[in-house]
Amino acid sequence: MVFVLLPAGAGAAEIQRWDLRDGDGEPWGLVVFPQPDPAYAPGWRLRLTARTPAAALDHHEPLRLDDGLGHLWQLDNRSAELVAPGESAWPLQSAQFDLEGLQPRPSAVLPLHLKLVLADGEAELLLGPDQVAALSSLPPVPSHQP
C-alpha cells in the first residue's frame, strides 16, 4: 500500500494538522491538539476526520497503533468530547482519542500504523516521519487555562 502524507508546519506545542489517505485512497484529516474544554480532563487529543460523507466512525472503540516492530498502543476513544455534555448526536465522520495512551512515546524514526474501527469495517492509515516526530516529542500534558 502507498500512503500520501501532506505535513503541516506547526510546532510540537501547537495544534498540528495533516491531510492523509487511507489504504483505499480515501482522504482523512488528522489533528493533534491540547483539550481546551475545562469540562474534560486536560491532555493531548488526536482527532481523525473522514473526508468522505459515506464514512461512519465507531465512537466507542479505541484507536490501535503499532510501529511494525512489536510495539503496540491503544488510545482511548474520547468522541464524547466532540459535543456538549448530554448531546447524543456525535459527528459521524470524526472520532477523537486520548494521546495519554501513547506511552512510552514511539520512536521518532519508525512509521506508525493506525487501525480505526468504522461502522462497516476498519480504516488503516500510516503516519510518516513528520507526524511520528510530532507525536514522539509532545510536551507534557497542558493544563486548562483559568
Image (spheres, rainbow, N blue to C red):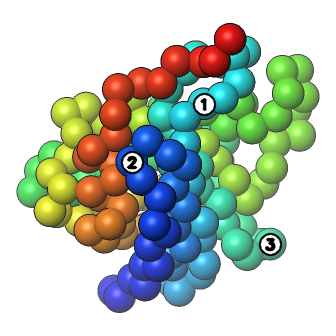
Mark 3 and mark 2 lie on one chain; the one further toward the N terminus is: 2
Quadrant of residue 120 in the image?
A: bottom right
> Which residue is denoted by mark 2 in the rendering?
12
Which residue is at a point 45% across and 66% down the rendered structure image? 9
Q: Is residue 85 left or right of residue 29?
A: right
Q: Where does the image place residue 40, in percent across and percent down from the top left?
A: 65, 18
How many angstroms separate mark 3 from mark 2 (CA)?
A: 30 Å
Which residue is at a point 69% across and 53% down the rendered structure image? 94
Number of residues whose C-alpha sits closer than 10 Å to that of mark 2, classed few (under 14), some (14–19) or many (20 or more) = some
Q: Secondary structure at mark 1?
A: loop
> Which residue is denoted by mark 3 in the rendering?
53
- Is the residue 62 above or below the residue 143 in the image? below
Of residues 121 and 51, the one drawn nearer to the viewer in this rendering: 51
> Which residue is denoted by mark 1 in the rendering?
35
Tags 1 and 2 in contact by the CB under 8 Å rule?
Answer: no
Q: Where does the image place residue 134, in percent across and percent down from the top left?
A: 34, 53
Amino acid on which the number 3 mark rests in the picture: Pro
Which residue is at a point 64% across and 47% down the rendered structure image? 95
How many angstroms separate mark 1 from mark 3 (CA)?
A: 26 Å
Q: Secondary structure at mark 3?
A: loop
Q: Is residue 4 left or right of residue 132?
A: right
Which residue is at a point 47% across and 79% down the rendered structure image? 6
Q: Secondary structure at mark 2?
A: loop
Q: Where does the image place residue 78, in percent across and percent down from the top left?
A: 60, 32
Amino acid on which the number 2 mark rests in the picture: Ala
